[in-house]
Image: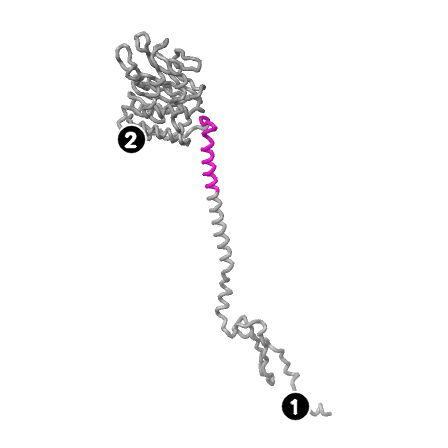
Amino acid sequence: METKIDVYVQSRGLTQDHDYRWLKIETNGQTPEIPTILKGSIQADGKRMVPVELIDSQKFSIVLFRLANELTLLITGLKAGEERIDFAGRSIRNSLLIRGRYGYEKDFRGILIRALTEQLELDLDRVITSGGDYGFTVDKKAIRTLAKLEDLQFDTQANHIDRIAKNTPENRKDLALELRQNQLPNREGLLVVVTSLKAGSVLETMGVWRGLSNRIESEIWQDYNKRILPSSTVSRQSILPVTHNQTQAKKGGLILMIVLLLIILVAILAQILQTRSIPQPEIQFRQETLSPEAQITPHEIQIQPETAPTYTPETQPETWKIQTPTSNKIETTPTPQIPPETLPTNDENSREKLEN
């Protein structure tokens, strides 16, 4: 663990005078100090809570919560080795508390994973020895390497659906696997609680992200809440992957919209072209009613006059017949009529006058 992470260890000595106490482990030594986070209630995610009241510190328990940009992890009830017993012959219990900025989230996950897989109990026992002014001493260099023992292979976003289940070894292993593959949720409030005395309804009321309790009957994880994270609680580091996903989604939606618009435009153009290519009903009708003989070109129009007859006053003039390519009807054009008085007669008197 980095030096910027505060480390506290609770244990006791073998004699009656060396009772349980918290020591703050620093590079230049270790001094008695109770973590301020354990002295009273805290306000997180709009809820007030006392972390130590959520657990039985004499039994294996975990509380992980976030306040602003700081994480706090409390792990209690880790058994010491058989050689470390108190004056009454009881097994000594060790506890660990680390506190630091959210930027060291991987270190918190590493410690939490080892606690859930029962490895931290052995790790912590190795760095604590009996003796000293307070009945026990801590190897300050060794304890700050505990968080580096876990190989976190993935670094993806956490599932933001809150879940609870019965506190069983199988469920603790499931939670350890999830933490090995995913980040902690970037939000305030309770993140992980492993307890022996709180009911599932209490964990739900407190809004815990992952809760395991001996008082929950179901051994299957139960989803009970899906959160929408406020933008104010999300750091820039965790925003980047989410923003990229949102950008990809927006690009996909834009491409789909463009494709739909192109399809609509192509359909409209096809309809317009199809409409223009359809012949007008009247033209089609005329072409269908024309006989083969009448379907000729304008160059084939011929005017054929008939033999002019001898007109008499009583005779109606014949007409010229004109054939046109657009109709089966024959149009007639009347010829000018000669007035009857201009035509010759058989009157003998008139002939004599002409001879004279």
In terms of image quadrants, where is residue 306? bottom right
User: In this rendering, would 124 be left or right of 291?
Assistant: left
- Can you give x and y, in whole percent of width and height, for residue 46 in the image? 40, 22
Amino acid type at image mark 2: Ile
Q: Quadrant of the N terminus?
A: top left
User: In this rendering, would 38 be left or right of 235?
Assistant: left
> Callout 2: 10 Å neighbours few (<14), some, many (20+)?
few
Q: Which residues make up the magenta segment? A: 232-254
In terms of image quadrants, where is residue 310? bottom right
Determine which residue is flagged by label 2: 220
In the foreground, 238 or 352:
238
Instruction: Look at the image and tell me whether residue 209 can be seen.
Output: yes
- Can you give x and y, in whole percent of width and height, for residue 90 in the image? 26, 13
Determine which residue is flagged by label 1: 347
Q: How many numbered dots are placed on residues in this image?
A: 2
Residue furthest out toward the top: 17
Instruction: Look at the image and tell me whether residue 207 can be seen.
Output: no
The numbered mark at residue 7 is none
